[in-house]
Amino acid sequence: MEYIYLGNSGLRVPKYILGTVPFSGTNGFEAAGDIKEDQARRMVDLSLEAGINMFDTANLYSKGDAERVLGAAIKGRREDVLLTSKTGFPLSDNPNLRGASRNNILTSIDQTLERLGTDYLDLYFTHLWDGQTPVEETVEAMTSLVKAGKIRHWGVSNYSGWALARTYTVAEQNGFIPPVTQQIYYSPEAREAEYELLPAGAELGVSSMIWSALGEGLLNGKVGRNKQTPENTRQGGGWPEPWVQDQERLYQVIDALEEVAANHNASVPQIAYAWVRDRPNVGPIVIAARNEEQLKENIASFDIQLSQEEQDRIETVARPVPIYPNWHRAMNSLELGSPSEITYLKGYKQTMGIDE
């Protein structure tokens, strides 16, 4: 397993991180999986054997039960693992226990630490943007947790590009500790992060950690034209996310993944992970699995090397349209783009049929 630095920090993390959305499978997360403590412990074992020592969870997942299952799975080996969690989604009717307010952050962290059976997190996220809470309050609260030893680093998730930049800038200019990573949705089908989030992260020194490179089950190999999605999957079990821009476009992405998978005697999920892994500006990737077989398969994708032709085959199918100002910049000032943007700008230029 490859280890990389997380943003502008000294924390080295594995390129693959195990996500815990399938842990527990209670309180509205039944469609995501039902991994209980014994199986979770085995999955932690398999991950550690493969060099994956970081585990990602959130108080949202099964409303805290996923944290409890993960805590039981890592019991007795806290020093061997890196732990992340998140807060922000409302879990009750209490109006102060949601968002990125000081009240919610300070209350949530203690509850999360108790469920995980630890006295600190290696990384703690605001799970969503809170436009009602002053950014200064959020960054001050996170800074206080770092100084108190309850968390080592912090990050944001599901922010827009401007919200990430504002959060980082407010922290840096006011003597607070800025976020070191953002956790964002990015897959071969969902490429919106290329507009702002991926370049912004690279320019700010904020690592882009990817969640759901398989499109929340859309790219699990069981979804496609004329396929009946099994009920024991997220998409077949009534999972409401994600929003799909164009169903035909999705099928074209799946077609491309299947074509490349056949070249490698691999699965669609393996090729999706391998493609996202090698994309520009991408940091660690959160993988997930409902059972040991899936976990082994997903881990094995790390060793798959796609040719440039194969990468391009997948890339061209779902390239984001060059919305303004991207078409204007690609057309008139591509050479003035930041290093983090050049790849995307060149793609927009190809889409517009403009010769180099």
Image (tube, rainbow, N blue to C red):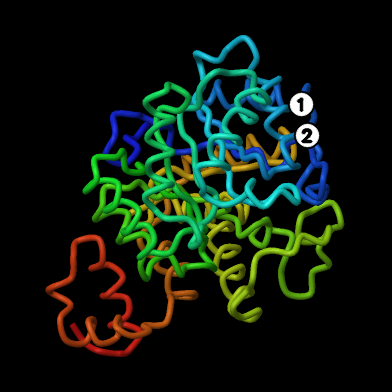
**Residue 92 drawn at (x, y percent):** 75, 48
**Residue 341 picture quarter:** bottom left
* Left or right side of 345 for 268: right
Q: Residue furthest bottom?
A: 353
Q: Residue furthest right?
A: 231
**Residue 103 drawn at (x, y percent):** 55, 41
Q: Amino acid at mark 2?
A: Ile
Residue in view at x 82 percent, y 61 percent: 238
* Left or right side of 16 for 214: right
**Residue 350 drawn at (x, y percent):** 31, 82
Name the quadrant of the C terminus: bottom left
**Residue 239 drawn at (x, y percent):** 77, 60
Q: Amino acid at mark 1?
A: Gln
Vertical position of residue 162 compared to residue 206: above or below: below
Check whether the beta carbons of the residues at disc 1 and disc 2 lie within 8 A of each other: yes
* Left or right side of 139 for 204: left
What residue is pinned by disc 1? 39
The numbered disc on residue 35 is: 2
Front-most of 153 and 335?
153
Residue in view at x 79 percent, y 75 percent: 226
Secondary element at image label 2: loop
